[in-house]
Image (cartoon, rainbow, N blue to C red):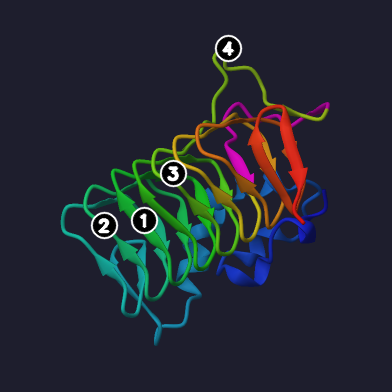
Amino acid sequence: MKLEEIIDISKTVGNSLFKDITYIWEVLPKIEDNIIDIGNSLDKDKYTMIEENIWVGNNTKIDKLSTIIAPCIIGENTEIRPGAYLRGNVIIGDNCVIGNSVEVKNSIIFDNSQIPHFNYVGDSILGYHSHLGAGVILSNLKNDESNIVIRGIDTNMIKLGSIIGNNVNIGSNSVLYPGTIIGCNTSIYPLTRVRGIIPSNSIMKDENNIIEKG
């Protein structure tokens, strides 16, 4: 699945991270080394550094009961709700919602995405206008802590969550296994265990029932 079949890199201030890569997951180790440079290059008319290496866009609301660990970039018109925990190396786009008891680390959340209730997002990419239902978990570590392999390709990564395309909707309490990739415009039913590569324009009703959208 090609990069352009999954996400629109124009919908994140972290778009420079997607240059000179072979596989989309290669972006994730680059966040830590580049996020501060990206933050320092942001338009100062749109972003304010509220603490060292924490940049926040205009009209964004951050609840006092949330926790933000630097470095972190949060776009404009975004809402960080009570109990949200941003663990560092996180890039969040414009018009996003990071909700109650949501934990995010080393991830890129594209514009207009919503992670509103009781979610874990680790070492992952959420494409433009994606949505996680309540309790959705993007697992990023295998039980045996071995490297994550995607279709026979060793990622050389022990921690790798999910790559979620544009306009994807994942139903409540679903669990995505490490290294899951979901193509754009796909819907996942609630309470589904998801692994492997899920095609674009699909509906996944359960592990053994994936149909093409009409």
Of labels 1 and 4, the one closer to you: 1
Label 3 crowd (10 A; few <14 / some 14-19 / many >=20): some
Q: Which residue is mark 4?
A: 144
Disc 4 is placed on an element classified as loop
Q: Is residue 159 magenta?
A: yes
**Among numbered discs 3 and 1, the one appearing first in the sequence:** 1
Please give the residue where the numbered disc 2 appears in the rendered image: 81
Q: Earlier in the sequence, mark 4 or mark 3?
A: 3
Give the residues in magenta: 152-163
* Badge 2 element: loop
Amino acid, disc 4:
Asp
Three-letter code for the amino acid on which mark 2 is drawn: Arg
Q: Which residue is mark 1?
A: 98
Compared with 145, 64 (above or below) is below
Tag 3 residue: 105
Is there CB contact under 8 Å for labels 4 and 3?
no
Camera-near label (2 vs 3) is 2
Of label 2 and label 4, which has the lower sequence position? 2
Q: Is there a contact, CB below 8 Å, between mark 2 and mark 1?
A: yes
Q: CA distance from mark 4 to mark 3?
A: 21 Å
* Residue in the picture at 57% in, 20% down: 142
**Residue under the image location 58 percent in, 12 percent down:** 144
